[in-house]
Every structure is written in structure tokens, then in C-alpha cells.
Image (tube, grey):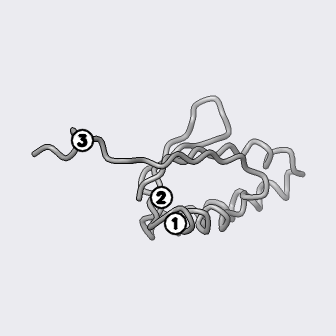
């Protein structure tokens, strides 16, 4: 199942600089792991904001929840999830 996931990590930058830098580095490591596992399929920055938007894949909402809560920024992030369904035009030959 695919999900559109918007992550606003602005509050991370309210932490002391050394804590923020360490958290962001851990987030990059975890993000790379999720990309390698195929959970994060596409990923974009949102210009002018400290956030991103991506297409995430998981078997179901519970599996997505586990992936999202594994993010080091989880306690500081505002995350919006939209489940996606195939459009009939994408099934055409």
C-alpha cells in the first residue's frame, strides 16, 4: 500500500545546536535505511520549508506507523499521512 507522507521537522531546529545536529544525522541514517528497504520510494524537499514529502510503501497502516515512529525526529515532527489508491487510468495498457 502506498501513502503520501508529509513531514514537518521545524521543531528539531528549536533544540540546542549540538542536539539538533546529532538528531538530524541520526535521521539521515534512518532515512537511508528506509529507502534501502523500499519503504521510502520517492522523496522531495519542500522549498522554503524545513520539511519533506514522499511516497512511502507499507503492507498496511500499522507497518507504516512502525516505520514513522522509528524516525529519530518522530517526537519533534508533525506528520501528515494520506493513503493512496490506484487511479483507473494507471491500470490501462
> Which residue is pictured at 87% across the width and 50% down the height?
15
Of callouts 1 and 3, the N-terminal one: 1
Quick one: 88 or 28, which is closer to the camera? 88
- The residue located at (63%, 29%) in the rendering is 48
Dot 1: few (<14), some (14–19), or many (≥20) neighbours within 10 Å? some
Q: CA distance from mark 1 to mark 3?
A: 29 Å
Instruction: Count every numbered label the image shows and give the total.
Output: 3
Report the residue marked by disc 3. Answer: 88
Badge nearest the viewer, 2 or 3:
3
Percent across and percent down for residue 5 are: 55, 48
Kindly state the secondary structure of the residue where label 1 is placed.
helix
Q: Is residue 50 left or right of residue 63?
A: right
Q: Are marks 2 and 3 in contact (CB under 8 Å)?
A: no
Spot occupied by residue 19 in the image (x, y as percentages of width and height):
84, 58
Residue 40 badge? 2
The outermost residue toward the right is: 16
The residue that mark 1 highlights is: 34
Asked whether the beta carbons under mark 2 and mark 1 sit within 8 Å of each other, the answer is yes
Above/below status of 34 relative to 11: below
CA gap, disc 2 to disc 1? Answer: 6 Å
In the image, 77: left or right of 17?
left
> What element does badge 3 sit on?
helix
Amino acid at each position: 500500500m502506498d501513502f503520501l507522507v508529509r513531514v514537518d521537522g521545524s521543531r528539531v531546529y528549536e533544540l540546542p545546536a549540538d542536539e539538533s545536529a546529532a538528531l538530524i544525522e541520526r535521521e539521515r541514517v534512518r532515512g537511508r535505511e528506509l529507502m534501502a528497504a523500499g519503504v521510502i520510494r520517492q522523496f522531495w524537499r519542500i522549498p522554503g520549508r524545513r520539511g519533506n514529502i514522499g511516497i512511502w510503501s507499507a503492507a498496511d497502516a500499522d507497518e507504516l506507523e512502525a516505520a514513522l515512529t522509528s524516525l529519530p525526529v518522530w517526537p519533534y515532527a508533525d506528520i501528515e499521512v494520506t493513503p493512496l489508491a490506484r487511479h483507473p487510468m494507471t491500470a490501462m495498457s
